[in-house]
Amino acid sequence: MTYRNRSDAGRQLAVALDHLRGAEVVVLGLPRGGIAVGSVVAASLGAPLDVIVVRKLGVPTQPELAMGAIGEGGVLVANREVLVSSGVDASTFAAVERAEQVELDRRAAAYRVGRTRIPLERRTAIIVDDGLATGSTARAACQVVRASGAARIVLAVPVGPRNIGRDFAGLADEVVCPATPEPLFAIGEAYADFSPVSDDEVIELLNRSLAQ
């Protein structure tokens, strides 16, 4: 195990991001686990915390295998390699996309009650998740942030594959990932406690950040 829990991961990730302290930074957590990590990073850096809502598009017969992702603002990312290997046709892909759009809209509405999106123009956006496996949701997040006018994008995750920097070249300006175990079978293997994070916990963390 590398981390005790997501709070511990956030503390260690914040150390690796300390060079951004004092910059015009916004921390964007991917729900749900990325908010738990990102809230610690934001508090450590003295930066505002916001949520960036994206949804993985899972292969119907293997929901954990991402064939793409969608994000706020109509961003769509397709993993052509997975689509070909899994044999998913266009109509099936569209059906999954429609279903996940419903959940994306629900989450965005729930998480943004009483708050608006933090403007990203001319700022450094740090996209935080609790780990990265296939990377489809993180790719969607990078595209959403780029379209929102961020001057610089930093992808920051506590654990990910060894080739994460290469895979995100051109999407993120910087990648920070303290742990890159080989082989990486599951993100949860890096945590002693990888308990699910609820929507209520996400909302509580976002509200707490506003009060700081």
Image: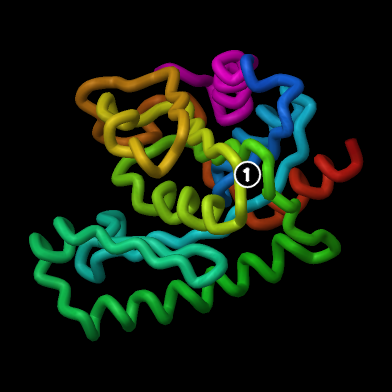
Identified at 69% across, 29% down, the residue is 40
Instruction: Name the outermost residue toward the right.
Output: 211
Above or below — where is 42 with respect to 199? Answer: above
Queried whether the magenta region covers residue 172, the answer comes back as: no
Instruction: Residue under label 1, please give it.
Output: 28
Q: Quadrant of the C terminus?
A: top right
Q: Given the image, on which type of amino acid does mark 1 rest?
A: Leu
Where is residue 15 shown, x and y percent of the image? 60, 14
Identified at 64% across, 66% down, the residue is 108
Identified at 40% across, 34% down, the residue is 188
Count of numbered tags? 1
Queried whether the magenta region covers residue 7, the answer comes back as: yes
Where is residue 62 shown, x and y percent of the image? 22, 61
Residue 191 showing in the rendered view: no
Left or right side of 50 for 69: left
Q: In this picture, which residue range is highlighted in magenta?
A: 1-18
Left or right side of 182 for 68: right
Where is residue 158 shown, x and y percent of the image? 47, 26
Pick whichever, 120 or 107, lies toward us. Answer: 120
Above or below — where is 121 with respect to 114? Answer: above
For the residue labelled by badge 1, is the local secondary structure a helix, a strand or a loop? strand
Q: Quadrant of the N terminus?
A: top left
Residue 184 showing in the rendered view: yes
Above or below — where is 185 with respect to 11? Answer: below
Pick whichever, 110 or 149, lies toward us. Answer: 149
Identified at 29% across, 20% down, the residue is 181
Pick whichever, 126 or 195, lies toward us. Answer: 126
Above or below — where is 15 with respect to 81? Answer: above
